[in-house]
Amino acid sequence: MESQIIAQAIGIVAMFFNIFSYQQKSAKGVIAFQLFGGLFFSVNFLMIGAYSGGLLNLVAVIRALLFLKKEKFHTDRWYWLIAFTLVYLVSYVMTFTVFSKELTVLSAIMEFLPVIGMVATTLAFRHSEAKVIRRFGFASSGCWLIYNIYAFSVGAIICEAFSIISIIIGILRLDKKTDP
């Protein structure tokens, strides 16, 4: 019971990083905040036994580090998208093989939702404009919200609900000024 409380508290810390990421003016700011959110969420998910979420968030930390150095690593190239997508798919398979999650129709669908969210975020990170990242955030947050309810990560559920609100505020506050 105590470990569950600690796990949920770690998820709440992660939540703050992700929610405030969408209020950053620069793409690098968004990515840096999400890096720390991913780090804390990976611990949160692994502690509650949501292995797909935990593995994918570990990959998200590496992805964020690489995308913060986009010019050096040329992460806007198509092969990075393919490489990350393959790693996401391997993580998905590991959930059922290495971590022995029972494979049912429901679990197959639910465990795949964060993979879709990760692909959306990877597509977003390829862009240099924060407004593009915010727009891709809708797809990612929707998928993760459903998964988080399924996995019952309180911080992650609140995070995605607030992230969606934060994305809307960010679009209204920062993007609508420049859109024609």
Image (tube, rainbow, N blue to C red):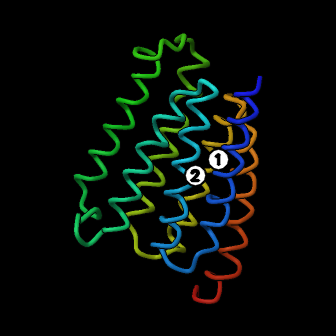
Q: Residue at x 47, y 46 (%)?
A: 118
Residue at mark 2: 139
Give the x, y percent position of residue 59: 40, 43
Front residue of 7/50: it is 7
Label 2 Cα neighbours within 10 Å, binned few <14 / some 14-19 / many ≥20: some
- Compare residues 92 and 73 and report the one nearer the observer: 73
Is the residue under label 1 in contact with that under label 2 (CB below 8 Å)? yes
Q: Which residue is mark 1?
A: 142
The C terminus, quarter of image: bottom right
Quarter of image, res 179: bottom right
In terms of secondary structure, where does tag 1 sit? helix
Q: Nearer the viewer, residue 99 or 113?
A: 99
Residue 34, compared with residue 151, is above or below; it is below
Residue at the spot 58% in from the left edge and 43% down from the top edge: 41
Q: Position of residue 13 (x, y in %)?
A: 68, 52
Depicted 57 relative to depicted 50: above or below: below
Say which residue appears at 44% left-offset and 42% top-offset. Answer: 58
